[in-house]
Image (spheres, grey):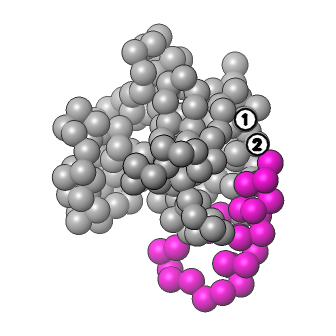
């Protein structure tokens, strides 16, 4: 609950400042976090293992970890959207009868790659591929593109559609 208020306050503060066009502070984030919690996701804020150098993580145990310092930034809001994409990928896999873990939402790889390429720049795509193992490329590319493309409000609706029965 503390992060809900912190993110809402940060959203108001940051929106009122001049921000680069790519920064995406999202005032719908508290509602998204609430929806994730209602679905059964446990959200950890800044646990000790955050010092391992990652911004966030989602596991199929329905555990989301968010790592940030001080007031949440546009990057932190993006991390929430990215990790929510992984929640959606998990829900999609479960809906399709795949209990192995996380799978891309978009089934058709050609359409998925076209969409990712329309959302992310080629340099971003290359950087993602350099930083993640090959087996994770499609999942991560879709998650990064989704975080850039969808608002927190969009993702709230998608979580309700894919994850709630």
Residue at label 1?
Answer: 37
Q: Is residue 18 above or below residue 7?
A: below
For mark 1, give the secondary structure. Answer: helix
Q: Nearer the viewer, residue 57 or 12?
A: 57
Which residue is at the far bottom? 18
Report the front residue among 149 and 54. Answer: 54
Q: Position of residue 154 (x, y in %)?
A: 64, 50
Residue 138 is drawn in which quadrant? top left
> For the view shown, which residue lies furthest in the front direction?
48
Task: Write the residue at 67% across / 78% down.
Answer: 14
Q: CA distance from mark 2 to mark 1?
A: 5 Å
Residue 13 part of the magenta-drawn span:
yes
Callouts 2 and 1 close, C-beta under 8 Å: yes
Tell me the residue that label 2 is attached to. Answer: 34
Q: Could you tell me residue 97's position as x and y percent?
A: 47, 11
Q: Which residue is depicted at the point 47% across and 74% down? A: 22
Residue 53 horizontal/vertical position (percent): 39, 54
The residue segment tinted magenta is 1-26
Question: In the image, is residue 38 part of the stretch drawn in magenta?
Answer: no
Q: Position of residue 72 (x, y in %)?
A: 62, 65
Q: Nearer the viewer, residue 120 or 61?
A: 61
For the point 76% across and 32% down, the residue is 38
């Amino acid at each position: 609950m503390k992060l809900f208020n912190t993110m809402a306050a940060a959203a108001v503060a940051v929106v009122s400042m001049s921000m680069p066009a790519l920064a995406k502070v999202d005032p719908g984030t508290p509602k998204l976090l609430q929806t994730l919690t209602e679905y059964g996701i446990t959200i950890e804020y800044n646990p000790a293992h955050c010092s391992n150098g990652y911004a966030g993580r989602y596991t199929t145990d329905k555990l989301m970890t968010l790592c940030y310092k001080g007031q949440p930034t546009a990057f932190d809001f993006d991390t929430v959207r990215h990790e929510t994409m992984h929640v959606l990928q998990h829900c999609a896999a479960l809906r399709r009868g795949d209990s192995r873990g996380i799978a891309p939402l978009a089934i058709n790889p050609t359409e998925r790659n076209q969409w990712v390429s329309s959302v992310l720049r080629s340099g971003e795509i290359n950087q993602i591929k350099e930083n993640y193992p090959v087996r994770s490329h499609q999942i991560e590319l879709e998650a990064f593109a989704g975080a850039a493309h969808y608002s927190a409000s969009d993702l709230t609706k998608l979580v309700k559609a894919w994850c709630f029965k």
